[in-house]
Image (cartoon, rainbow, N blue to C red):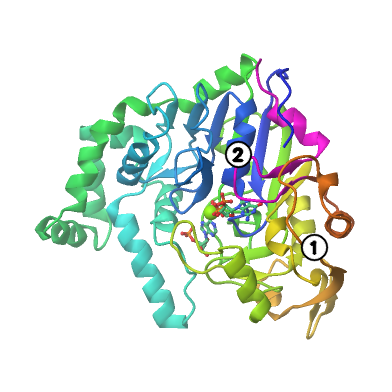
């Protein structure tokens, strides 16, 4: 990778979004791009996310703390649109402390963010069990309480972090839930009778987190107004978006670029760059339609070589060929200035590669537009175009032009078929194993 230039561009808001079904390698790139940012903010999701990066050669998976935490002096923020599991967050802070200082000066937690309580985690498991029993089709959630917490928020009865750290407000929320929500009182009672009370532990971490809780959005706006560079870290991916993903097989938040400004309360007109992260193939964890999924040896080979196992739950990821129809859709929804494609090294050694250029539906015929209906998508068969593969070890540094000709042809085809501009390529999991297109240079510009 070329070393970042020393001149810092003034201010701006850059949003980085997963362009597929999550796990595209966002953590690695945000860690890299954060070198050129002042503020790094997560804008949605919670500890369903698992963002992998390498610090001093050691693998670290972040679930809630933004992937900029390992750059000294950066302010890391969890915005209003995030849901926070307090106990898990404290555990993560302790893990990160081995590599970086985490203090109220560099970790700002929005008082507006909603809290994942033991009740929401319990309900996530229960709803999944009910779905499985009634229709045989659970969503395959991470069981981290994400859906129930967002449901509570939209029902306007959730617990916000600012109230969680205030004992009076917290107890009043618990009392109100016990008197209004069926099953809550019984859940509390059984918890207090159990050997290890989750609720007692839950209340204990409030004190620990209190100094970190603030009007994070106001601070970020102040940073933006002062010419600081803001980097927004997406979690999950475009196709898991609550409104625009493959509903109901989605997560419960707005994962797309537009969600970033809503979460942090920032004017959309101030956004200066939107970048997508994708894999050079596709993976998905959990249930839901996946037209290019490979249920064969090639799929298994991708999983093994790519170590495609969930960073949060450890579940095997479903693997398949690159889907240009879905990528075109992600481009339309997000308006990417550029897309970074990861894991070129994993495709190395395959004689042939395929890209879905359209779908074929048994009744609707050829489909070129990503359907809104998950059932329609599930019935679609991909129409493939075949490409020549590449072999051997790939360069870890330099520009995209350093890739073998077949890989460059593959990128060119993806650009043409998906209407995207590829501005970076991953050739390994490490921070430095990345090839930059010239457009990406300005993102990683750091102070002298
Ligand atoms: P995220 O959720 O989008 O941050 O992605 P995950 O961390 O869940 O999954 C991406 C996985 O791919 C992680 O294990 C990364 O270390 C790894 N990774 C990212 N980019 C590359 C790459 O270019 N090559 C290889 N071999 N691994 C990569
Ligand atoms: P990162 O940020 C991949 C999937 C789950 C399930 C669906 C709903 O690491 O890319 P949820 O627990 O959110 O209610 O589950 O969404 N899912 C992810 N898949 N990467 C993630 O995050 C994911 N977060 C949730 O597997 O299918
Ligand atoms: Mg992940």
x, y percent for residue 184 = 24, 58
| Residue on which the image places disc 1 | 324
Question: Within the magenta stretch, is there residue 426?
Answer: yes
Place residue 291 in its image quadrant.
Answer: bottom right
Please tell me which residue is depicted at 59% across the width and 56% down the height of the picture. 22
Question: Within the magenta stretch, is there residue 64?
Answer: no
Residue 335, can we see it? no
296 w.r.t. 392: above or below? below
Please tell me which residue is depicted at 47% across the width and 82% down the height of the picture. 135
| Residue on which the image places disc 2 | 30
For the C terminus, give its image quadrant. top right
User: Which residue range is magenta in the image?
Assistant: 424-448
**Which element is circle 2 on?**
helix
For the residues labelled 2 and 1, say whether their Cβ atoms are less than 8 Å apart: no
x, y percent for residue 273 = 73, 34
316 w.r.t. 83: above or below? below
Mark 2 lies within 8 Å of ligand 1 (Cβ measured): yes
Residue 411, can we see it? yes
């Amino acid at each position: 990778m070329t070393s970042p230039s020393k001149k810092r561009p003034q201010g701006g808001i850059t949003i980085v979004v997963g362009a597929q079904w999550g796990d595209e390698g966002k953590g690695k790139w945000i860690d890299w791009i954060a070198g050129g940012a002042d503020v790094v903010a997560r804008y949605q999701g919670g500890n369903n996310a698992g963002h992998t990066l390498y610090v001093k050669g050691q693998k670290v998976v972040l679930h809630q703390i933004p992937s900029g935490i390992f750059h000294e002096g950066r302010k890391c923020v969890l915005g209003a649109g995030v849901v926070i599991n307090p106990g898990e967050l404290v555990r993560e802070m302790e893990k990160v402390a081995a590599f970086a200082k985490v203090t109220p000066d560099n970790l700002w937690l929005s008082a507006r963010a909603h809290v994942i309580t033991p009740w929401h985690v319990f309900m996530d498991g229960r709803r999944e069990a009910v779905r499985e029993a009634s229709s045989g089709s659970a969503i395959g959630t991470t069981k981290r309480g994400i859906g129930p917490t967002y449901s509570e928020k939209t029902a306007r009865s959730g617990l916000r972090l600012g109230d969680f750290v205030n004992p009076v407000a917290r107890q009043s929320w618990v009392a109100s839930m016990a008197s209004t929500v069926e099953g809550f009182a019984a859940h509390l009672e059984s918890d207090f009778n159990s050997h290890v009370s989750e609720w007692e532990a839950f209340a204990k971490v409030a004190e620990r987190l209190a100094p970190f809780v603030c009007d994070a959005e106001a601070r970020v706006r102040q940073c933006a107004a002062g010419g600081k560079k803001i980097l927004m870290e997406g979690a999950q991916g475009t196709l898991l978006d609550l409104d625009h993903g493959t509903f109901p097989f989605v997560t419960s938040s707005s994962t797309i670029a537009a969600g970033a400004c809503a979460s942090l309360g920032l004017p959309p007109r101030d956004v200066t760059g939107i970048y997508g992260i994708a894999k050079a193939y596709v993976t998905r964890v959990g249930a839901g339609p996946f037209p290019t999924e490979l249920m064969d040896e090639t799929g298994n080979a991708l999983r093994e070589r790519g170590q495609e196992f969930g960073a949060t739950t450890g579940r095997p990821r479903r693997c398949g060929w690159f889907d240009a129809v879905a990528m075109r859709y992600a481009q339309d929804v997000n308006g990417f200035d550029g897309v970074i494609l990861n894991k070129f090294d994993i495709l190395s050694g395959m004689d042939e590669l395929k890209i879905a250029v359209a779908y074929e539906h048994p009744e609707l015929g050829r489909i070129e537009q990503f359907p809104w209906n998950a059932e329609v998508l599930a019935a679609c068969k991909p129409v493939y175009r075949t490409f020549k593969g590449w072999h051997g070890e790939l360069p870890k540094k330099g520009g995209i032009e350093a890739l073998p000709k077949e890989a460059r042809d593959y990128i060119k085809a993806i650009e043409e078929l998906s209407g995207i501009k590829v501005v970076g390529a991953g050739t390994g999991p490490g921070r430095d194993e990345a090839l930059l297109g010239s457009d990406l240079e300005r993102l990683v510009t750091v102070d002298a």
